Image: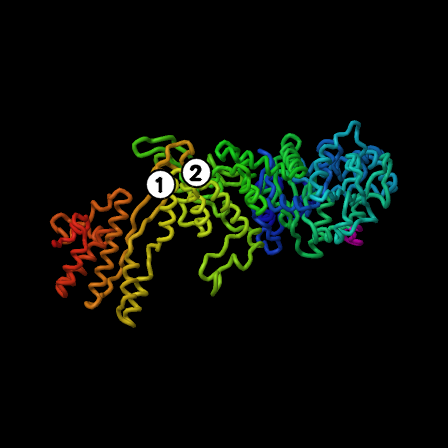
């Protein structure tokens, strides 16, 4: 039993121990092996894409973006199983059909077929795993006792729907199967004629005459892959039904015509299974035969009831992307989603417009799945273009949804240090339906962290479609224009940059930008151009904040500036000259640093609130550090001290521009050991630059008093830094 224990989920192991026969155990283990494969080796599993999913209804399954786009382009074929006809028309599933046929044919309860059905039911009840015994084997046993035409007549009669018949589920699938050019492409393994009853007057196909998927113009209408009942439901048309084990074997293995048909479809289309389970005979034969023939399956999806882990386990070894959903209330969640998807399919432009209109309210009042629909829209070039070009652009606080670092920002209080506001968790305001919910931190724990999951969707990260659209202008070059200039944004993100430009006059836009280390130069130029136009209304504080950000980004040199080491190597080899002095001054030049505001919390200021610069950005003056001293020759002291004085004059101007508080804490030129002067303060910030200047100036005084006096005379009287230098006139 040790080997058995390693082959099945822990939750099912106890049930295995209760089975009454080795036969049952082997059947169940075989089914588990089919379901999950060898869990210790994923080498045979198809690597499935992990793109974003979109919820079209509040409680329904999440449909991959790639699948939605493929259907919009007419590249999807839906395979419809018994669950479609069972959903609303109330036709039986495969086992229910077998039981009705047995009743019609008057089969003895002691017959092998009846005993096999009873055995399957009991195993299902005891173990909770359907499909251990395949229903096609039941019909195979019936073939030993009855003629095929009698079985087919009984099957047809069992499938005859009661009037009036609800074919709304079939209409939903037909809407989904209709491409942008009006072409309908749908395949069903059902025998009933309910798709025909939807009054579409579509072409139909059935064996042995099937369309050639390699010629898409030929593949139109409804393909009854396993045959179709007669109009009167008294038998099978054409070559009959694919019903028993032997008939499945011929279609998928011996003759292989059904496998060839499916393989040809996969060469041109994306396939979606609806109304099947992974254990249904059509799926088992089709996918296993195809896997053995080609070894790999791609671009296949299946709606599967149950939780995500179980659904994935059932389909993964087959190379199929499972789309899990809650089967409660007769699969209501599935059909609500399919209906929403079909409504989108009938009017794609209208769906886009409706979602974008809803987005104009802002993200906060919307549901996570509604925000997810906006995320779906901006994840493609066409959607981003629609979003950007909307008559009234959705507000700038959508940036908090598009940026995972804002969605997963640590909760905090709004307001200021003096006026504490509400406690806000940004995840509650901006999360998507696809986001993994983080743990709720203690509001009083000011050091709590919240990490952004690696798989969190980011509107501004390059996705698969973006990579497909890359060209030379999106890649940096060794020489020429793209060696000097930043490569262009990919088309989709360029569209989003256009939207950001349109809303750049809103507080949320500049508030969000202050959280970024930089924005692409093209975006900065577009925002700058828009804000400076005379006919564009914007608040002065907004324009001022953007200018500070632009200056900060343009000046940024990082905490570690390698220029000082490059200069040291340069002067060691070639000595000092005017170029070296300019380089040294540039390396030591102070600059503005702009970042996110200290106060206000994890939510941008409201449009209607009073706009204050301090609520939008945080400003500071940065002073490049000198990690290792550099020796300045006597002959270049005068030029160097002048250049450093100009840097100090700039520092004074920058500090005064943001309030002048940095000028109040300059360390003494001579350290006062009696008060325990902080050596860190003396070696960092403005103090370090003042002390460096004084040290070099003292050298100049000793070397050339006249030059030193000329330098001192250049300082304005009353200057804060000059007053601290310790030199008189």
Lower sequence index among marks 2 and 1: 2
User: In the rendered structure, which segment of residues is drawn in magenta?
Assistant: 249-257
Q: Which residue in the structure is indicated by mark 2?
A: 537
Element class at badge 1: loop
Percent position of residue 591, x then y: 31, 51
Q: Which residue in the structure is indicated by mark 1?
A: 597
Percent position of residue 234, x then y: 87, 35
Q: Does the magenta stretch include residue 256?
A: yes
Whether residue 300 appears in this view of the structure is yes
Q: In the displayed image of the protein, which residue is found farthest to the top?
A: 164
Disc 2 to disc 1, C-alpha distance: 24 Å
Q: Nearer the viewer, residue 59 or 613?
A: 613
Q: In the displayed image of the protein, which residue is found farthest to the bottom?
A: 573
Percent position of residue 389, x then y: 55, 42
> Which residue is at 25% across, 45% downward?
656
Percent position of residue 582, x then y: 29, 62
């Amino acid at each position: 039993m040790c080997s058995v224990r390693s082959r099945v989920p822990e939750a099912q192991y106890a049930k295995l121990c209760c089975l009454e026969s080795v036969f049952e155990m082997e059947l169940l283990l075989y089914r588990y092996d089919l379901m999950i494969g060898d869990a210790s080796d994923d080498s045979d599993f198809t690597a499935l894409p992990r793109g974003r999913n979109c919820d079209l209804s509040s409680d329904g399954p999440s449909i991959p973006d790639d699948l939605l786009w493929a259907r919009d382009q007419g590249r999807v074929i839906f395979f419809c199983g018994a669950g479609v006809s069972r959903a609303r028309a109330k036709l039986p599933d495969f086992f229910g059909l077998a039981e009705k046929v047995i009743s019609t044919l008057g089969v003895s309860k002691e017959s092998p077929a009846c005993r096999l059905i009873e055995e399957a039911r009991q195993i299902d009840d005891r173990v909770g795993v359907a499909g251990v015994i395949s229903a096609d084997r039941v019909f195979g046993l019936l073939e030993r006792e009855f003629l095929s035409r009698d079985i087919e007549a009984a099957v047809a009669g069992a499938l005859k729907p009661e009037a009036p018949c609800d074919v709304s589920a079939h209409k939903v699938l037909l809407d989904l199967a209709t491409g942008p050019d009006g072409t309908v492409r749908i395949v069903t393994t059902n025998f009933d004629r309910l798709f025909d009853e939807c009054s579409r007057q579509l072409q139909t196909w059935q064996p042995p005459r099937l369309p050639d998927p390699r010629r898409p113009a030929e593949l139109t209408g409804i393909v009854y892959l396993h045959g179709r009942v007669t109009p009167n439901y008294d038998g099978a048309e054409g070559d009959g039904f694919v019903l028993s084990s032997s008939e499945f074997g011929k279609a998928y293995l011996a003759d292989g015509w059904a496998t060839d048909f499916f393989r040809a479809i996969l060469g041109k289309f994306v396939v979606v299974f609806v109304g099947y389970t992974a254990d249904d005979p059509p799926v088992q034969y089709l996918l296993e035969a195809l896997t053995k023939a080609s070894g790999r399956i791609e671009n296949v999806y299946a709606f599967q009831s149950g939780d995500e882990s179980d659904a994935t386990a059932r389909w993964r070894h087959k190379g199929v992307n499972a789309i899990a959903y809650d089967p409660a209330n007769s699969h209501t969640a599935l059909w609500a989603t399919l209906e929403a998807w079909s409504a989108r399919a009938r009017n794609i432009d209208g769906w886009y417009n409706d979602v974008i209109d809803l987005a104009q309210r802002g993200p906060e009042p919307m549901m996570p799945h509604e925000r997810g629909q906006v995320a779906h829209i901006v994840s493609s070039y066409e959607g981003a273009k629609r979003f950007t070009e909307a008559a009234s652009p959705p507000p700038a606080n959508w940036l908090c949804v598009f940026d995972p670092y804002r969605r997963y920002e640590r909760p905090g209080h709004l307001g200021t240090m003096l006026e504490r506001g509400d406690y806000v968790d940004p995840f509650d305001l901006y999360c998507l339906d696809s986001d993994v919910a983080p743990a709720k931190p203690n509001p009083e724990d000011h050091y709590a962290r919240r990490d952004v999951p690696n798989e969190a969707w980011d509107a501004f990260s390059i996705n698969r479609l973006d990579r497909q659209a890359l060209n030379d202008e999106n890649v940096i070059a060794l020489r020429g224009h793209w060696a000097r200039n930043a490569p262009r944004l990919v088309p989709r993100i360029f569209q989003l940059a256009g939207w950001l430009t349109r809303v750049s006059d809103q507080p949320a836009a500049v508030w969000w930008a202050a959280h970024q280390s930089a924005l692409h130069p093209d975006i900065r130029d577009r925002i700058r151009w828009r804000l400076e136009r005379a006919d564009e209304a914007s608040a002065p504080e907004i324009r001022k904040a953007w200018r500070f950000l632009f200056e900060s980004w343009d000046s940024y040199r990082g905490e570690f500036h390698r220029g000082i080491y490059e200069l040291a190597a340069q002067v060691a080899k070639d000595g000092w000259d005017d170029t070296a002095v300019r380089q040294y001054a540039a390396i030591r030049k102070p600059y503005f640093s702009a970042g996110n505001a200290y106060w206000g919390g994890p939510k941008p200021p409201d449009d209607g609130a009073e706009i204050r610069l301090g609520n939008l950005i945080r400003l500071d003056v940065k002073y490049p550090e000198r990690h290792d001293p550099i020796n300045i020759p006597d002959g270049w002291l005068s030029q160097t001290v002048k250049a450093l004085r100009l840097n100090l004059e700039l520092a004074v101007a920058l500090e005064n521009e943001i309030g002048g508080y940095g000028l109040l804490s300059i360390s003494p030129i001579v350290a006062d050991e009696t008060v325990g002067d902080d050596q860190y303060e003396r070696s960092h910030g403005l103090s370090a630059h003042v002390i460096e200047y004084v040290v070099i100036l003292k050298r100049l005084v000793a070397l050339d008093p006249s030059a030193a006096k000329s330098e001192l005379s250049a300082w304005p009287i009353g200057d804060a830094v000059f007053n601290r230098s310790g030199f008189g006139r």
